[in-house]
Image (spheres, grey):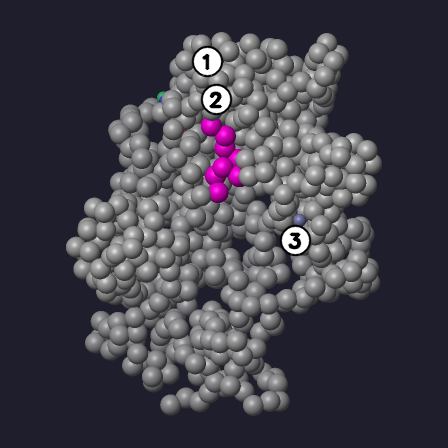
């Protein structure tokens, strides 16, 4: 028996590591269960504590894993990310190893010993060696995880339907409904049967009565398999060149630059095939899985049974099932959103980051990782190529490709032969002059809408602002109606007759009179998508209009359902926010109207022009992707702005040429690196104090520019005052140095956002 020694354990809580007594020799990275005053929690072993605190130490409750379950290279990646983003290991591990992934200690080893016996004999180094052998495939442990029935692509999901709970159900049926209610209405069938302890026939009865529905997971993923499965595609010369340029034998970053429809996905697929043939795995990142059923259908068609999918919207059991499939080496292709960059895939031979410019790759909550950046780091650790693809690359990636750090691969044509849409600009200032009032739909746009509808084709209208009216203000005193808890105005939602705060969710019924001066002159300013929908319906009473924005797509699956309806031609006009910009192809979509191209330009953010350019080019690219040619009408008050000029010409390279010197002149990324420190407090002074203290410490670092502390752009949210401090440096070195000089305190008042994308909130 070996003894218990003081061991440092880090918890997924805003706390520094704590010291517990644990068996000697536990390897770092192992999960253990410990008690906190608030209950049992899972922590991760950091190692022995050489200088334990002089108090009575508690023993840990249990060791969860026999050996570290994450593949060694992924552990290296987490260690890097922990240091870079200043966050603890358990927080990162929670992103890739769901707590429900549990090892069966009764698993029998080839020599007949059970894992539990080795545990009880404290043979930790022996277990660790077994784990390493398991990771490299030398020691198959097929029964390692509990609940093996979860595995396999064909799992069935059971969902509660909308039907109200009936008055009379049998006791067994009640068990099922209760189990579903306890897990947000969805469970995998095997889980459900286990939790409710009922037989399958009970499910069948409930299904017949319409109280539940059963969906095969595979069907969820590929609603449209037929069309894509067996299409034989011969890569054109450019695609072929791109394919051969990627060297699968080592690390390298490639930027595959080509307009939407230029055949990037076909290149990824052929690359994936090469890599699979070598027995290595493929990690495939997409910005948003709900928007890519087509991709999944294509992949399933090409690699049947080999694709696993990670999805931010999947519930916890589904995530567990996916992770176990990966750990059991059952799916060589893993497609997923942001956190999938940390998926426990072994022997990775290719990493694809599609639409690499998308901001959804950056997490806006702790840990604030950037999946594209970590993908590159992972490629380096795994020794494999990383392919970034985009029609409008981020300036970071473009700059790296231009100066030779990444290899640039261009696709310039659309193989399907469809042409780029034509773009017409409407100057809203001129419209205002002739109409003598603010114009929402210019005559040109109205005419085009009418013609499109008459031809039985589809139109899409973009306005990047939801709600009915942007805000209400008092005509008498000029004051806007602000959120009582945040320093932004409330947005009017007509459907629910509410004024709502888009930051904290505060809602109220619109007041009759101005709360500030009592006058009855309240008035809405600045229309949102909800109002556009109303106005359109008045103009085109017979048109089938579908609005897609955050308000209409809150229910899980409703965005997908709406997009599918539009694809099938059941919608004449789609109205929405930037959600419309991504993914889908609508065969009958020939007109895209951009109602106010300038909305994104007015925010105080050095990336405003880049974001506007991306959004406009992407939406424009939606028009006429199939056989029908399309056109775009872009309404703007600033037709001379570079972002607009180049978006109209759909010329990314020209945009980049113009934008990069500005970034360099102002010492912004991609030329410089930034860190954003935020603090919050009960009072502005509280918030300020923390950052002032930090600034004093950082002033010793050379080649570091410190801006602030200043009020955050939104200076108050949920009654907390917010300040920020920005660090800038030409290289990343001084920013890393800042973390050494002033380490982040877990749970402290200051939070760090490295390589921030969002300065607004
Ligand atoms: P991207 O990923 O750049 O948007 P895709 O790979 O999805 O482009 O290609 C767009 C369409 O063109 C798809 O339907 C695809 O099957 C088709 N396509 C791509 N490459 C070829 C090719 N070489 N020959 C014929 N069709 C192609
Ligand atoms: Zn608010």
Q: Looking at the image, is mark 3 or mark 1 nearer the viewer?
A: 1
Count neighbours of disc 2 (C-alpha within 10 A) and say few if under 14, some if 14 to 19, many if 20 or more. many
Mark 3 → mark 1, Cα distance in angstroms: 47 Å
Above/below status of 62 relative to 193: below
Q: In terms of image quadrants, where is residue 167?
A: bottom left
Mark 1 → mark 2, Cα distance in angstroms: 8 Å
The residue that label 1 is drawn on is 453
Q: Looking at the image, is mark 3 or mark 2 nearer the viewer?
A: 2
Image position, residue 536 (x, y; %): 54, 21
The residue that label 3 is drawn on is 753
Count neighbours of disc 3 (C-alpha within 10 A) and say few if under 14, some if 14 to 19, many if 20 or more. many
Picture mark count:
3
Mark 3 → mark 2, Cα distance in angstroms: 39 Å
The residue that label 2 is drawn on is 573
Q: In terms of image quadrants, where is residue 495?
A: top right
Image position, residue 420 (x, y; %): 50, 16
In the visual, does 452 lie left or right of 212? right
């Amino acid at each position: 028996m070996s003894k218990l020694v003081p061991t440092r354990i880090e918890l997924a809580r805003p706390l520094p590591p704590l010291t517990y007594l644990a068996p000697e020799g536990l390897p770092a990275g192992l999960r253990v269960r410990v008690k906190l005053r608030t209950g049992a929690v899972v922590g991760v072993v950091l190692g022995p504590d050489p200088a334990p605190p002089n108090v009575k130490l508690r023993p840990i409750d249990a060791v969860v894993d026999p050996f570290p379950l994450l593949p060694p290279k992924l552990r290296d990646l987490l260690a890097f990310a922990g240091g870079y983003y200043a966050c603890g290991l358990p927080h990162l591990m929670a992103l890739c190893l769901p707590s429900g992934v549990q090892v069966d200690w009764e698993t029998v080893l080839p020599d007949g010993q059970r894992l539990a016996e080795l545990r009880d004999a404290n043979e930790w180094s022996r277990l660790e060696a077994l784990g390493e052998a398991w990771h490299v495939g030398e020691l198959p442990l097929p029964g390692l995880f509990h609940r093996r029935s979860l595995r396999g692509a064909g799992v069935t999901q059971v969902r509660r339907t909308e039907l109200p709970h009936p008055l009379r159900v049998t006791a067994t049926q009640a068990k099922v409904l209760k189990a579903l209610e306890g897990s947000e209405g969805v469970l995998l069938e095997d889980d459900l049967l286990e939790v409710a302890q009922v037989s399958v026939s009970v499910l069948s009865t409930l299904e017949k009565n319409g109280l539940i529905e059963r969906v095969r997971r595979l069907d969820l993923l590929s609603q449209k398999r037929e069309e894509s499965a067996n299409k034989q595609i011969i890569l054109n010369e450019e695609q072929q060149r791109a394919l051969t340029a990627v060297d699968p034998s080592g690390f390298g970053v490639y930027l595959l630059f080509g307009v939407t429809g230029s055949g990037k996905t076909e290149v990824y697929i052929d690359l994936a095939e090469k890599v699979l043939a070598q027995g290595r795995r493929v990690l495939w990142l997409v910005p948003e899985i709900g928007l890519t059923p087509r991709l999944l259908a294509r992949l399933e068609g090409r690699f049947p049974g080999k694709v696993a999918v990670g999805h931010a919207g999947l519930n916890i059991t589904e995530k567990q099932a996916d992770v176990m499939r990966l750990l059991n080496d059952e799916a060589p292709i893993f497609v997923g959103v942001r956190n999938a960059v940390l998926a426990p895939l072994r022997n990775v031979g290719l990493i694809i980051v599609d639409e690499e410019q998308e901001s959804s790759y950056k997490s806006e909550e702790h840990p604030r990782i950037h999946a594209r950046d970590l993908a590159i780091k992972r490629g380096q650790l795994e020794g494999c190529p990383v392919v970034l693809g985009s029609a409008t690359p981020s300036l970071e990636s473009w700059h790296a490709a231009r100066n030779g750090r990444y290899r640039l691969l261009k696709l310039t044509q659309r193989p399907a032969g469809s042409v780029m849409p034509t773009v017409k600009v409407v100057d809203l200032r001129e419209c205002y002059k002739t109409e003598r009032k603010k114009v929402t739909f210019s005559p040109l746009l109205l005419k085009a809408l009418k013609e499109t509808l008459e031809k039985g084709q589809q139109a899409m209208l973009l306005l990047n602002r939801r709600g009915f009216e942007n805000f209400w203000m008092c005509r008498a005193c000029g004051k806007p109606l602000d959120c009582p808890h945040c320093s932004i105005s409330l947005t009017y939602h007509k459907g629910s007759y509410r004024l709502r705060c888009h930051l904290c969710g505060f809602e109220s019924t619109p007041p009759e009179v101005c709360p500030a001066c009592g006058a009855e002159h309240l008035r809405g300013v600045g229309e949102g998508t909800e109002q556009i929908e109303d106005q359109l319906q008045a103009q085109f009473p017979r048109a089938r209009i579908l609005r897609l924005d955050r308000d209409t797509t809150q229910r899980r699956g409703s965005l997908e359902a709406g997009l599918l309806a539009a694809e099938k031609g059941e919608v004449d006009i789609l109205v929405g926010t930037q959600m419309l910009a991504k993914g889908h192809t609508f065969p009958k979509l020939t007109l895209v109207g951009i109602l106010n191209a300038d909305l994104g330009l007015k925010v105080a953010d050095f990336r405003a022009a880049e974001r506007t350019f991306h959004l406009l080019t992407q939406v424009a690219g939606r028009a006429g992707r199939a056989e029908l040619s399309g056109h775009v009408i872009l309404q703007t008050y600033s037709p001379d702005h570079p972002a607009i000029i180049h978006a109209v010409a759909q010329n990314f390279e020209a945009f980049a040429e113009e934008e990069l010197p500005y970034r360099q002149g102002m010492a912004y990324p991609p030329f410089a690196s930034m860190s954003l420190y935020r603090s919050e407090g009960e009072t502005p002074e509280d918030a300020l104090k923390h950052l002032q203290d930090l600034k004093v410490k950082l002033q010793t670092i050379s080649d570091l520019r410190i801006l602030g502390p200043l009020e955050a752009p939104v200076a108050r949210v949920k009654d907390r005052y917010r300040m920020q401090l920005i660090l800038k440096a030409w290289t990343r070195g001084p920013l890393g140095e800042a973390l050494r000089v002033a380490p982040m305190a877990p749970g402290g008042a200051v939070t760090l956002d490295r390589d921030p994308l969002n300065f607004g909130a």
